[in-house]
Amino acid sequence: MSVIAQKCPEIHVTVVDINDKRIAAWNDTDLDKLPIYEPGLPEVVKEARGRNLTFSTAVDDAIDKADMIFISVNTPTKTYGVGKGMAADLKYIELCARQIARVAKDDKIVVEKSTLPVKTAQALKNILDNTGNDVDFQIISNPEFLAEGTAIDDLLNPDRVLIGGDIHTNKGNEAVQKLVDIYAHWVDRKRLLTTNIWSSELSKLTANAFLAQRVSSINAMSEICEKTGADVDEVARAVGMDTRIGSKFLKSSVGFGGSCFQKDILNLVYISKTLGLPEVADYWEQVILMNDHQKRRFAMKMVSTLYNTVSDKKIAVLGWAFKKDTNDTRESAAIYVTDHLLNEQAKVVVYDPKVPEERIYADLDALGTRPERENRERVTVVQDPYEACENAHAISILTEWDEFKDYNWEKIHKEMYKPAFLFDGRRLLDADKIEKTGFDYYAIGK
Ligand SMILES: NC(=O)c1ccc[n+]([C@@H]2O[C@H](COP(=O)([O-])OP(=O)(O)OC[C@H]3O[C@@H](n4cnc5c(N)ncnc54)[C@H](O)[C@@H]3O)[C@@H](O)[C@H]2O)c1
């Protein structure tokens, strides 16, 4: 929304959220306090905020005044009832729809920006038409393809923008064109794809499933590499140079995280099951199972290397965010690796340049594996990476933050317990350079 406001100064964008703390942070004069850490975002907000970009908690008022409403609320995996652990929880979407229906006194275009299961637009339309004030609602699907960490660049230079709508009716077509005209302010019209609404909803889940599948495929090969002496980076380069395959999303690691891949694939698995397609469901579910396996395998490799016990050993975890250049930790591999290590009674010291201490404890507490008190006893969060590593038996790199590459690894090695182990879950460090430092170095797929 900030980028739309920046690129379309004649359009007023109001971002509303029921979370008043988040809105207050979006309004903070100190741009370092924005709730999302994203390179380039403060500059965009600085330019548009107060001009044609407003952040507010007055949801009804914003609905009333808007011509077009983007629903961008969270759609997490259900944690209860039918479809628990798999289906998307659409309660926040439904609440939004009911609120829009109640408040709207004139025609509105409602844009699905959240990632939704295919056919959600039908449910939205039913709620809006049956509980509304006899105004016309046009539903459009406009899934978001940005990746965290590169969000601003992805939004400014998208590969494509997908806009799905009721393109066989005049009103539907008009609504689609209105959104096309917004993006056309800065995106080449050739990259604006209009489709029917179901194709648009399903394409977003498909794109994420394909991307996650590539990560799980290369991670599956990483285990074969470890058994055979092949090197997974070399394998990835060799297959990635095949133009039919391409080089992206072939970086082997301790596993993908983030709020989207797992949730969206589980959602696809659930849709397949409800459509009576068990083979399709199993096919996609394996992508998730492989990812869980990789995280567990990495933690178990640490334990077995440290003579089958990490009990009361100090383990440094470098990086908590699910990838570099974001402060988002949802489904981060670091959470699960740490949880496995805590089950083995390790003492874990965490350093991440952007993730605050309370987030790290909240992530561990949310797993419910042990009493919260124990998480605080066993896990320490520090602001200095060298402090995290001092006297540690082992270090694991779980986020590929660039700063980790530049550390004085020789100095760190000198100040650790010997033998000192370095587990590189992101294949971030140059193995040749590390060898000279004296570490027993372990990277995925080596
Ligand atoms: N995070 C990403 O990189 C990304 C990328 C593409 C698509 N998506 C999709 O976008 C959607 C949102 O993702 P997110 O990461 O921003 O989630 P999020 O949980 O960070 O943000 C959702 C926000 O919606 C607010 N909210 C919930 N109900 C509301 C209501 N009734 N009225 C007003 N505000 C309400 C919440 O308070 C919260 O601040 C999801 O469907 C996700 O799949 C996310």
Image (cartoon, grey):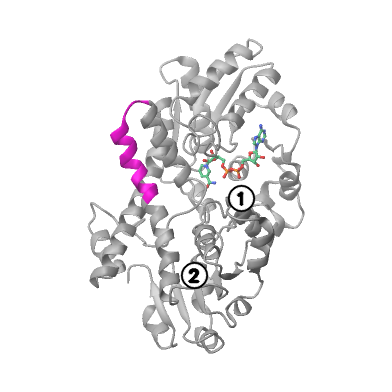
The outermost residue toward the top is: 134
Numbered disc 2: secondary structure: strand
| Proximity of marks 1 and 2: CB atoms separated by less than 8 Å | no
Which quadrant of the view contains residue 233?
bottom left
Mark 1 and mark 2 lie on one chain; the one further toward the N terminus is: 1
Which disc, if any, is residue 130?
A: none
**Badge 2: how crowded within 10 Å, few (<14), some, or many (20+)?**
many
Residue 292 visible in this rendered orientation of the protein? yes
Numbered disc 1: secondary structure: helix
Residue 255 position within the rendered picture, expressed as x and y whole percent measured from the top left: 42, 58
Q: Which residue is mark 2?
A: 397
Placement of the N terminus among the 4 image quadrants: top right
Establish if 294 lies above or below 69.
below
The answer to if 278 sits in the magenta stretch is yes
The answer to if 202 sits in the magenta stretch is no
In the image, taking residue 94 as reference, residue 255 lies left or right, namely: left
Amino acid at the residue labelled 2? Ile
Q: Nearer the viewer, residue 420 or 184?
A: 420
Residue 285 position within the rendered picture, expressed as x and y whole percent measured from the top left: 36, 42
Q: Which residue is mark 1?
A: 366
Which quadrant of the view contains residue 357?
bottom right
Magenta: main secondary structure equals helix
In the image, taking residue 219 as reference, residue 254 lies left or right, namely: right
Establish if 408 lies above or below 333.
below
**Badge 1: how crowded within 10 Å, few (<14), some, or many (20+)?**
few
Of marks 1 and 2, the one in the foreground: 1
Amino acid at the residue labelled 1? Ala
Q: Specify start and end residues of the magenta stretch as a single range.
A: 275-289
| Residue under the point 45% across and 46% down | 262
Establish if 266 lies above or below 235.
above
Q: Nearer the viewer, residue 438 or 61?
A: 438
| Residue under the point 63% across and 51% down | 44
